[in-house]
Amino acid sequence: MVTVHEDLLAPDVVADPYTYYGRLREEDPVHWNDLYETWVITRYDDVVWSLRHPEFFSSEIFIRDPRSPYPPILEEDQGLYEFNKTYLSHWFIRRDPPDHTNMRKVPHLQFSPKYIEQRFRIMVQDIIKYLVREVEDRGRMDVIYDYAAPLPILVIAEWLGFPREDREFLRHASRGVLSVDEAAADRNEKTTHALLTLKEYINPFVEKKLANPGDDLLSLMAEGERQGVMSRDEVVGNTILLLIAGHQTTINLIGNGTLSLMRHPDQ
């Protein structure tokens, strides 16, 4: 018998998710949540099993789900919702094999341990040193504003081969894409605007990389298009995914990690 309530976003769950999900793991590790109509899987082995069986747990739920969007959207935004749903489904994490496997192979060379150690780590360290030098004379730092926020977008922009001076534009636009996860009824308008803005920005860079490839990640993605593994929309879509995936999570990790260190300096 499950003794926890079904509201995954309730204040007590947000305040202490560890206790909530710990109890759920003990009582019903593969749990169907009636309120949100979703599976909640809390054991590692079960998560791995489900990820390896897309015939039962598909990553393409974003385009396969026949239900209406939740929370509800404006009726006049249905067309925008369909555009967003289709375009965001170009992300390889929202595709099942063989599409997922084929697209994932394209940037894989720059996710190898050798590349991370010999190239990526050095690039990140150089950017960190640059950010520290920027505040050194001041003698103080706002961890979020001066470090956590600019660090990931500087790294991602350089990794993809975008100009460093475009980082604020990229940060603002990528955050706009995340509007799709908001509860606001008009969220699809913001998301569509952000996607079209980024698409217009990224396309010319893909053309340049096709003509003159470099050693950056976007050149690898463009090569995937040249080889017919990815369409242009898939190249652009997965570039947007990289901008978002590395951006928000890193900022939150640095902020939360610093706060935890301040509260528990002995650790």
Image: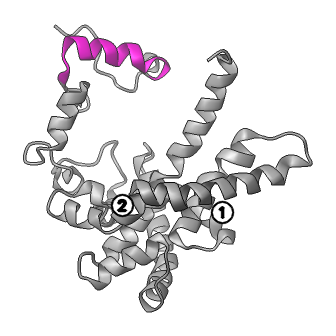
The amino acid type of the residue labelled 2 equals Asp
As drawn, the label of residue 253 is none
Q: Nearer the viewer, residue 212 or 176?
A: 212
Secondary-structure class at tag 1:
helix
Left or right: 39 in relation to 115: left
The numbered mark, 2 or 1, whose residue comes first in the sequence reads 2
Image coordinates of residue 111 in percent, x first then y, are 40, 58
Q: Tell me which corner region of the image, top left, top right, bottom left or bottom right, holds residue 119.
A: bottom right
As drawn, the label of residue 168 is 1
Q: Nearer the viewer, residue 234 or 220?
A: 220
Picture residue at 28% right of the left edge, 60% below the top: 92
Picture residue at 21% right of the left edge, 11% below the top: 27
Left or right: 58 in relation to 113: left
Left or right: 95 in relation to 147: left
Provide the residue span drawn in magenta.
Answer: 14-30
Q: Nearer the viewer, residue 35 or 28?
A: 28
- The crowd level at tag 1 (other Cα within 10 Å; few <14, some 14-19, many 20+) is some
Q: Tell me which corner region of the image, top left, top right, bottom left or bottom right, holds residue 94.
A: bottom left
Image coordinates of residue 222 in percent, x first then y, are 38, 79
Residue 63 among magenta residues: no
Residue 21 among magenta residues: yes
Picture residue at 26% right of the left edge, 16% below the top: 24
Does 3 appear above or below 35? above
Q: Which residue is mark 2?
A: 77
Q: CA distance from mark 2 to mark 1?
A: 28 Å
Does 198 appear above or below 57? below
